[in-house]
Image (spheres, rainbow, N blue to C red):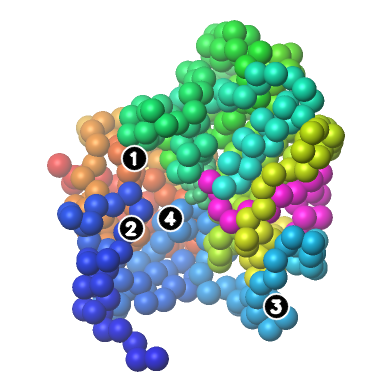
């Protein structure tokens, strides 16, 4: 097949392709990437960019990794796909076993799906079907936190932040959910019970109609890159138990070491009833997600009138995705990832610290391999993006947030460059 030229690609892109959260009448420029290796994206014009985004949290081992490539190739020769209805295979069995072993205690049943948003739909449906099956009427709503983000499908949108999410666009269509204040504490703030009082009031008032609480443990990602005290999460678990409400932890962004623990729930020493995983599950190679639940939840669902859980995506348990996920998790667990994340955290802390003094910066915060500069005013994306690219880094801000979550393999020198460029671009940004 003859390759398309750079200008042909640009023309097709402008005329036909939707990008995430984009306009087709007034499109942002899209940078053409020819290949990627290690922590670098190679542009069609020959420039190389140090990748600060890990392709939206996913690419923890870097691009073009020989172990992951080999796992993918070996599985492709075995079978790329087979339906999951009535069929099981080694890559899915191995992955399910591993996930049960490494996730917080009690999560024993695994439902595979295609993307993070779908895994959230599955989690919500599990929670609702659970109460229905037990014959408990009316427990159909979810309690979520302001500044939360859980995906772009309709169920997921309904539990995203009601202001910064898409509620205003679809207000008549989205399921009406309950929201409590986002945690008013940072990761390190000394605990005060007042931080949980709004949540406590909401769960107490609405428990009769709540199937579950859904939240991102410790790090609220796309809804504001906010870090909060693990004690908040601990109290949420206690209150869910007190009020007979299930807890769904959305670890799609935080899972697989990003915050310094393998799963962010570990900061609070809690287990949710239902857990969503995605993104870094395959080391960023392909799309795959998983929703895990306890036996209590699966028993409840399967004892009900339907007797089955009513969901079944076409590409459920895709063998290629499961094989690469197995290789990625093995690679992660065999590495000294805790030390790597601690080193990245230290370097982000010192590298981004100079931004604290800048007049246009509201806050600088770091947790694990996540570094955030929060500006006082929203940023003009296309303009700042070009400045980053011109200085050799790939960083994609949103709202007031300029942030990085690099691949774990990023070396000291590249990370120093990433931090320096971040600080200097922010400094000169008017
Ligand atoms: N939950 C969280 C916490 C996320 O960060 C995301 C993706 N940014 C999602 C859900 C949705 O995942 P996906 O984009 O794979 O549908």
Front-most of residues 355 and 122 = 122
**In whole angstroms, how far apart are the C-alphas of marks 4 and 1?**
13 Å
Q: Which label lies toward us, 3 or 1?
A: 3
Above or below: residue 269 compared with residue 368:
above
Q: Residue furthest left?
A: 430
Q: Earlier in the sequence, mark 3 or mark 1?
A: 3
Above or below: residue 228 compared with residue 103:
above
Q: Earlier in the sequence, mark 4 or mark 2?
A: 2
**In whole angstroms, how far apart are the C-alphas of marks 4 and 2?**
17 Å
Q: Which label lies toward us, 1 or 2?
A: 2
Q: Where does label 1 land, which residue? A: 401
Element under disc 1: strand
Q: Is mark 1 within 8 Å of ligand 1?
A: no
Residue 79 numbered tag: 3
Q: Is residue 10 left or right of residue 2?
A: left
**In whole angstroms, how far apart are the C-alphas of marks 3 and 1?**
42 Å
Asked if the stretch drawn in magenta spans residue 115, the answer is yes
Q: Where does label 2 land, which residue? A: 19
Residue 53 numbered tag: 4
């Amino acid at each position: 097949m003859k390759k398309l030229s750079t200008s042909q690609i640009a023309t097709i892109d402008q005329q036909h392709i939707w990008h995430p959260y984009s306009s087709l009448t007034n499109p942002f420029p899209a940078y053409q990437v020819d290949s990627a290796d290690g922590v670098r994206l190679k542009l069609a014009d020959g420039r190389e960019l140090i990748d600060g985004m890990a392709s939206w949290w996913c690419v923890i081992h870097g691009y073009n990794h020989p172990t992951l490539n080999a796992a993918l190739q070996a599985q492709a020769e075995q079978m790329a796909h087979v339906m999951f209805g009535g069929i099981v295979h080694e890559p899915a069995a191995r992955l399910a076993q591993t996930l049960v072993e490494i996730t917080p205690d009690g999560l024993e049943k695994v439902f595979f799906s295609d993307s993070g948003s779908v895994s959230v739909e599955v989690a919500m449906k599990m929670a609702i079907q659970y109460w229905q099956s037990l014959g408990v009427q009316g427990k159909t709503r979810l309690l979520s936190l302001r500044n939360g983000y859980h995906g772009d499908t309709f169920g997921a949108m309904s539990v995203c932040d009601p202001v910064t999410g898409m509620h205003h666009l679809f207000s008549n269509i989205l399921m009406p959910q309950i929201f409590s204040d986002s945690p008013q504490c940072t990761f390190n703030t000394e605990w005060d019970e007042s931080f949980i009082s709004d949540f406590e009031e909401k769960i107490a008032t609405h428990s009769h109609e709540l199937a579950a609480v859904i939240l991102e443990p410790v790090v609220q990602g796309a809804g504001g890159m906010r870090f909060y005290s693990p004690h908040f999460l601990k109290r949420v678990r206690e209150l869910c138990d007190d009020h007979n409400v299930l807890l769904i932890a959305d670890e799609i962004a935080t899972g697989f070491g990003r915050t310094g623990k393998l799963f962010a729930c570990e900061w609070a020493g809690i287990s949710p009833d239902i857990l969503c995983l995605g993104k870094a599950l395959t080391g960023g190679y392909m799309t795959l997600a998983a929703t895990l639940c306890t036996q209590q939840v699966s028993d409840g669902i399967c004892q009900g009138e339907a007797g089955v859980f009513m969901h079944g995506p076409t590409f459920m348990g895709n063998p290629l995705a499961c094989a690469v996920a197995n290789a990625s998790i093995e690679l992660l667990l065999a590495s000294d990832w805790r030390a790597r994340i601690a080193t990245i955290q230290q370097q982000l802390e010192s590298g981004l610290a100079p931004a604290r003094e800048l007049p246009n910066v509201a806050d600088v915060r770091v947790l694990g391999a996540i570094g955030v500069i929060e500006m006082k005013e929203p940023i003009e994306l296309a303009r700042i993006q070009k400045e980053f690219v011109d200085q050799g880094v790939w960083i994609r801000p949103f709202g007031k947030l300029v942030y990085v979550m690099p691949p774990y393999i990023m070396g000291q020198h590249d990370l120093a460059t990433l931090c320096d460029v971040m600080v200097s671009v922010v400094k000169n940004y008017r």
